[in-house]
Image (cartoon, helix red, strand yellow):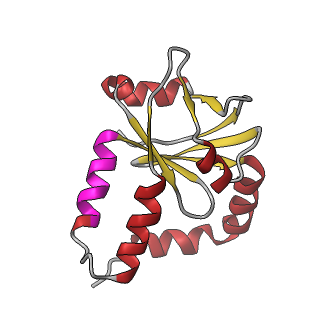
Amino acid sequence: MPFTGTYARSIDDKLRIAIPKPIRAKLGESRDAFLYMAPGTDGCVSIYTENEFARLAEQLATVSPAAEQSRAFSRLFYGQAQQIQLDRQSRIRIPSELAQWARLERDAILVGVRDHLELWDRQRWEEYRTKLRPRYDEIAAAAFRREG
């Protein structure tokens, strides 16, 4: 079941955020398993289930390790990725390096993006969304265009 929705969250002084109930429900049995937090694109932090993180690793393994971009991405992504787990209050702790990466402070937005979650600084998310909203139809058409 894909992750969907946008949730306003507060980050506490210990860099923890509560995971909303609809997301916890989608985590299901994997709720007790580990999650992986890693640098995302466009200035966010990405959060993956164990299965999706493994699937991403398999997908990256199909790219030649001799390719410069592949090596660079793997180093930056996996070198900063961290294993995390929900605590008893259904919170996760954001590693400080990743909080700095995404400029996360107090107000954040958690976004469901199909196979993963993204954690954004609230102001950064609003700027991103405002910038792209007028181009929604164009972006949708490009997203569904088949290469070939």
Up the image or down, 147 lies above or below 1; here it is: below
Judge left or right: residue 76 versus residue 102.
Answer: left
- Does residue 6 show up magenta in the picture? no
Residue 143 placement: quadrant: bottom left
The residue lying at 63 percent from left, 30 percent from top is 16
Type of secondary structure dominating the magenta stretch: helix
The residue lying at 65 percent from left, 49 percent from top is 120
Residue range of the region highlighted in magenta in the rendering: 50-60
Residue 39 percent location from the top left of the image: 52, 56
Up the image or down, 122 lies above or below 14; here it is: below
The residue lying at 40 percent from left, 30 percent from top is 26
Which image quadrant: the C terminus?
Answer: bottom left
- Does residue 52 show up magenta in the picture? yes
Judge left or right: residue 14 versus residue 63.
Answer: right
Residue 45 percent location from the top left of the image: 56, 51
Up the image or down, 59 lies above or below 12; here it is: below
